[in-house]
């Protein structure tokens, strides 16, 4: 390979050129033996400074070689730029850029396209300020009469606009205006090009700027919209898809430029959504959910609902080529392939108020029910109907229900897809239209139950899902005549489907049953025996994928019925199959994750009833953590690959054991090295490992703090560090659990917490002072932990009261009544006794916090609070301060009467 020379003098050596071309040819169709050798050779050549010069020379100038070889050189060059841009010599970069520019106008479209990809990679990594020649070349090409030049420039620009649009909407040193100001008028001009590819690329490029909305696009909006309306009838479906995509994005903007044209846009979307091209229809269908979520007035769309709803219902029927139709025929006895198993993600243990939002339709129907997981017109139509029902409520029922009823009453095997779509529609509107459906829900559910036994598996599966959407009603109706019988029919129907021979139906039934379990809770207790028998029979019937779901259903059942599960007749049904599965799986089998989660719920539910199984489960968790910590540094010695999720699941199961067994876990902890393992996990670099580790630290602090004592300073130090992390908003869940664990340790070790108190306070107070920057749970746990520290060491905390009293009391006001809130108020009373003047400036807020209690069950605390309030009343009555405080409280002062003030 040639040495480093000036870029103008660089020429490839023939021998090196031939060798690299030969490797590229081999790389295109390698045998298994070749792959390693080719990789070694490429690694060898990549050490030479001018290797990339050879690649660009082959790509740009080796016209005697096949287009495939030249493309391979270009793509390898692109990868090298992406991975080693910073270390590339400036002379080499200059040579590569110079050779690339003419390639954008090459005669061969594949070369032009690859050139555009390399150019976009350069811009993505290095911007355009160091390559102004590129911008000039792109403008020159766009203005050329040579179609190859125009197309090549547009191809590169479309990729730049997709990968890094902000670069073109930036001030560039050396340029009088932003690049987008120069390019956008040319893009708009190309909307009327006779060449489909130019219309497509120019429209795709402009669409990338809708969310950024540069000034030039805002000023050109009328011309853009005119162009969209013209292109809406384009013969190319790809162009029409982009028109729909533009309207979807424009309706979502703050300043809705579509409002004056909404009638025309809606008419167009209705036409396309009901058209024969499914891909364009899918793009148009996205418009309805975007409209519902945009904040636009509901009145614009309302008049079109009688035309829109039939289109959505029509599109909710399975297409003949839907992959789900084939998958639905798969027999439950056929083993799952590895590719059938979705990746699963364990959620680390979390202490506090969790703020999560779910899109029920996507979660339940798309994920639990649809194995394909490919977004298609059917799913998009169902999601749109769900959104419409949430916005327009019962107003859609007069249009919807006659169509649903007609489809449901259609008989014959040839129209089963119509019946299935109607059942899906009922589920889709099950929440948004609940008030209008309520008087008829008994009939609807009675009608759906027989569909659980339909001959078509996809009708059985969708019936499971739709019935689950009405779980809340099924449970509430138990109190009324006939309601219990219907609830039992739903329960029996879902249990029958658990044992279906079809994998798809098994999955839907399991998910639906888990939903019912969460709502029904104690209503399941009389049926526990038959439920457990059905769930355990699935263990011998299901393949790997659905077993994961049934483990979740068992765990949900344990959470729902709690200690009621702890009866010998139930344990005899439940535990042997669970233990059998537990023994079948190795410590490195990922199928153990959902089983560990299941055991966590079962251990918590059974409480001390789990004691007989605890030693085996405890020791296995220890073994898994040990082997994974070894695998992290030496996977060969460990004999297993490292995967932090094994550690997280094991830590969470140990937390479940601590919560379930209480102080009975003490003997297991005593005989193990858990303390040292836990400290290592608290120091782990993975935040989800630390999150679960601090949850376990807090749980152990509650039940056996004595075994943490030898490393107490270390645990406290590492926990305190989590509260002072440089990017706290990125590791909030870790900080939350660490904060909670410190509080739990404080009330157990009492004065031994004192060395760390000031360090912890210095991190807690800023969180209280800026609550809007953090999630609710962290703020609540911060307030509780600060109160617990004040309770055990008031003499150390009270001198700093003025700095945090107001925000602390504000946070306490929002915490629900429980024992943790009691602890915090014990701290408040202890501090006030220590330094009464420290709360004077925040007395109104302290009174509001006290007024937030519905009932204080702890008699001693109730008396302490009474003493505190009466003390302030005596202190401030003469000066009039007490009356001012009461006046500021307004109606809340009535909540303080019970304290005799």
Image (cartoon, rainbow, N blue to C red):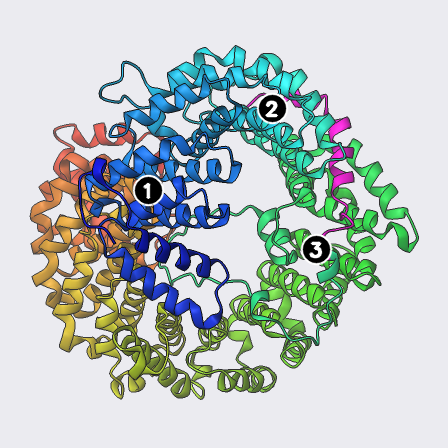
Q: Residues within 10 Å of mark 2 (few under 14, many from 20)?
A: few
Residue 724, position as x, y percentages in the image: 17, 51
Cα–Cα gap, marks 1 and 2: 72 Å
Is residue 835 visible from the viewing direction of this image?
Answer: no
Most extreme residue toward the front is 14
Vertically, is 113 above or below 760? above
Mark 3 or mark 2: whose residue is earlier in sequence: 2
Q: In the rendered image, which residue does mark 3 sit on?
A: 323
Question: Where is residue 237 drawn, in percent x and y?
Answer: 67, 31
52 and 835: which one is in front? 52
Task: Determine contact: label 1, label 3, CB under 8 Å.
Answer: no
Counting residues from the start of the chain, the first of labels 1 and 2 encountered is 2
Q: Is mark 1 on a helix, strand or loop?
A: helix
Quarter of the figure with the N terminus: bottom left
Mark yes or no: residue 868 visible: yes
Q: Give the left or right position of residue 588, taking residue 695 as reference.
A: right
Q: Quick check: 576 above or below 30? A: below
Residue 320 counted in the magenta span:
yes
Q: What element carries label 2?
A: loop
The residue tagged 1 is 851
Q: Is residue 88 left or right of residue 511?
A: left
Span highlighted in magenta in the image = 296-324
What is the quadrant of residue 324 in the picture? bottom right
Q: Where is residue 419 in the image (x, y as percent from the top left)?
A: 83, 49
Q: Quarter of the image for the C terminus: give it.
A: top left
The verdict on residue 89 being magenta is no
Q: Mark 2 points at which residue?
A: 195
Q: Which of marks 1 and 2 is in front?
A: 2
Viewer-closest of 835 and 361: 361
In this view, which residue lies farthest toward the right? 412
């Amino acid at each position: 390979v040639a040495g480093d020379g000036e870029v103008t003098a660089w020429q490839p050596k023939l021998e090196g050129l031939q060798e690299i071309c030969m490797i590229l040819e081999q790389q295109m169709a390698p045998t298994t033996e070749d792959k390693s050798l080719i990789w070694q050779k490429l690694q060898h050549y990549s050490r030479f400074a001018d290797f990339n010069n050879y690649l660009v020379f082959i790509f740009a100038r080796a016209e005697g070689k096949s287009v495939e070889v030249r493309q391979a050189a270009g793509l390898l060059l692109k990868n090298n730029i992406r991975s080693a841009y910073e270390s590339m010599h400036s002379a080499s970069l200059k040579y590569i850029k110079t050779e690339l520019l003419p390639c954008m106008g090459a005669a061969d479209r594949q070369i032009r396209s690859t050139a555009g990809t390399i150019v976009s990679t350069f811009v993505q990594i290095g911007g355009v300020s160091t390559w102004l020649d590129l911008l000039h070349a792109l403008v020159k090409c766009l203005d050329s009469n040579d179609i190859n030049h125009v197309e090549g420039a547009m191809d590169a620009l479309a990729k730049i606009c997709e990968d890094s649009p902000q670069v073109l909407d930036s001030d560039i040193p050396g340029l009088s205006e932003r690049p987008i100001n120069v390019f956008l008028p040319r893009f708009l001009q190309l909307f009327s090009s006779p060449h489909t590819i130019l219309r497509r690329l120019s429209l795709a490029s402009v669409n990338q700027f809708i969310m950024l909305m540069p000034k030039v696009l805002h000023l050109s909006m009328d011309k853009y919209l005119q162009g969209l309306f013209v292109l809406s009838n384009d013969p190319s479906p790809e162009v029409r898809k982009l028109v729909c995509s533009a309207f979807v994005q424009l309706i979502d903007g703050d300043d809705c430029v579509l409002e004056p044209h909404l009638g025309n846009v809606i008419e167009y979307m209705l036409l396309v959504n009901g058209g024969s091209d499914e891909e364009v229809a899918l793009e148009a269908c996205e418009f309805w959910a975007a409209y519902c979520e945009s904040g636009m007035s509901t009145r614009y769309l309302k008049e079109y609902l009688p035309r829109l709803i039939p289109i959505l219902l029509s599109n909710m029927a399975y297409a003949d080529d839907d992959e789900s139709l084939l998958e639905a025929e798969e027999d439950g006895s056929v083993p799952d392939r590895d590719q059938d198993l979705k990746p699963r993600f364990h959620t680390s243990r979390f202490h506090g108020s969790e703020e999560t939002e779910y899109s029920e339709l996507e979660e339940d129907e798309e994920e639990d029910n649809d194995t394909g997981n490919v977004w298609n017109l059917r799913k998009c139509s169902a999601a749109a109907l769900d959104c419409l029902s949430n916005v327009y409520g019962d107003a859609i029922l007069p249009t919807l229900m006659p169509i649903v009823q007609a489809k449901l009453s259609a008989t014959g095997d040839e129209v089963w897809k119509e019946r299935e779509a109607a059942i899906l529609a009922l589920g889709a509107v099950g929440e948004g239209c609940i008030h209008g459906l309520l008087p008829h829900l008994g009939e609807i559910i009675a009608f759906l139950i027989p569909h659980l036994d339909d001959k078509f598996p996809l009708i059985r599966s969708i019936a499971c899902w739709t019935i689950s959407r009405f779980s809340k009603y099924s449970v509430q109706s138990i109190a009324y005549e006939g309601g219990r019988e219907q609830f039992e029919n739903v329960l029996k129907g879902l249990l029958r489907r658990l044992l279906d021979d079809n994998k798809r139906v098994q999955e839907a039934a399991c998910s639906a049953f888990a939903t019912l379990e969460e709502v029904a809770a104690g209503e399941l207790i009389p049926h526990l025996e038959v439920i457990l028998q059905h769930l355990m029979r699935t263990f011998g019937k299901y393949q790997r994928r659905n077993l994961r779901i049934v483990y979740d259903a068992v765990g949900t059942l344990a959470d729902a019925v709690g200690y009621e599960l702890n009866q010998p007749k139930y344990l005899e049904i439940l535990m042997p199959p669970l233990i059998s599965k537990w023994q079948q799986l190795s410590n490195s089998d990922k199928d153990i994750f959902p089983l560990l989660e299941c055991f966590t719920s079962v251990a918590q539910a059974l409480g001390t009833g789990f004691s007989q199984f605890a030693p085996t489960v405890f020791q296995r968790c220890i073994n898994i953590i040990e082997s994974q910590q070894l695998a992290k540094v030496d996977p060969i010695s460990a004999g297993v690959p490292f995967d932090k999720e094994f550690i997280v699941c094991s830590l969470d199961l140990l937390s479940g054991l601590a919560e379930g067994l209480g102080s009975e876990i003490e003997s297991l902890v005593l005989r193990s090295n858990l303390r040292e393992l836990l400290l290592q996990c608290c120091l782990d670099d993975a935040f989800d490992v630390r999150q679960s580790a601090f949850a376990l630290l807090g749980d152990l602090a509650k039940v056996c703090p004595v075994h943490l004592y030898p490393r107490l300073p270390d645990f406290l130090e590492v926990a305190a560090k989590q509260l002072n992390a440089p990017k706290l908003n990125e590791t909030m869940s870790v900080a939350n659990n660490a904060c909670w664990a410190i509080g739990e340790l404080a009330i157990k070790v009492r004065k031994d917490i004192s060395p760390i108190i000031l360090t912890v306070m210095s991190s807690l107070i800023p969180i209280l002072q800026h609550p809007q920057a953090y999630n609710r749970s962290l703020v609540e746990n911060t307030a509780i932990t600060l109160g617990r520290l004040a309770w055990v060491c008031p003499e150390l905390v009270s001198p700093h009261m003025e700095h945090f009293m107001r925000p602390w009391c504000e946070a306490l006001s929002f915490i629900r009544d429980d024992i943790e809130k009691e602890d915090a108020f014990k701290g408040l009373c202890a501090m006030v006794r220590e330094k009464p003047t420290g709360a004077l400036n925040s007395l109104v807020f302290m009174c509001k916090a006290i007024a937030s209690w519905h009932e204080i069950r702890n008699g001693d605390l109730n008396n302490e609070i009474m003493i505190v309030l009466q003390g302030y009343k005596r202190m401030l009555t003469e000066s009039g301060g007490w009356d001012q405080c009461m006046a500021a409280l307004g109606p809340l002062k009535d909540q303080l009467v019970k304290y005799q003030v």
